[in-house]
Amino acid sequence: MKSTRKGLRDGDLMKDTYERLNCADCEQVLKKENDPDEVFSVRICPECGARFKELR
């Protein structure tokens, strides 16, 4: 699982005009899952299921 920063650099993610993270393939806004036991959040594309981790 890549980080969101790495995904932005590689072109897997893009930001829209409101600075929301979007999947570059599906152009869908990523959903966020917060696990209270982890240091990071998981961002998931609802269309293709791509997963990216994001430090909180």
Image (cartoon, grey):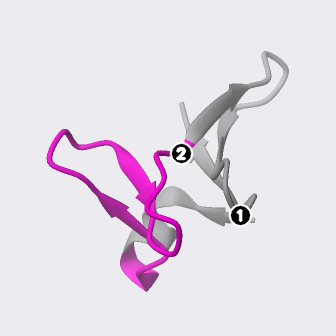
Q: Amino acid at mark 2?
A: Leu
Q: Position of residue 7 (x, y in %)?
A: 50, 70
Q: Secondary structure at mark 1?
A: loop
Q: Which residue is mark 2?
A: 30
Q: Residue at x 65, y 35 (%)?
A: 41
Residue farthest to the left, as pictured:
17
Residue farthest to the right, as pictured:
37
Taking the image as shown, residue 31 lies to the left or right of residue 9, namely right
Check the image and report above or below for 18 versus 36: below
Q: Position of residue 18 (x, y in %)?
A: 19, 39
Taking the image as shown, residue 13 lies to the left or right of residue 16, namely right
Taking the image as shown, residue 38 lies to the left or right of residue 51, namely right
Q: Residue at x 53, y 30 (%)?
A: 56
Check the image and report above or below for 10 versus 14: below
Residue farthest to the bottom, as pictured:
10
Q: Which residue is mark 1?
A: 48
Q: Amino acid at mark 1?
A: Cys
Range of residues picked out in magenta: 9-30
The verdict on residue 50 being magenta is no
> In the rendered structure, are the residues bearing label 2 and label 1 in contact, judged by CB atoms less than 8 Å apart?
no
How far separated are the C-alphas under marks 2 and 1?
10 Å
Q: Residue at x 46, y 46 (%)?
A: 29
Q: Position of residue 10 (x, y in %)?
A: 45, 83
Question: Could you say which is closer to the camera, residue 2 or residue 21?
Answer: 21
Secondary structure mainly formed by the magenta segment: loop
Taking the image as shown, residue 35 lies to the left or right of residue 11, namely right
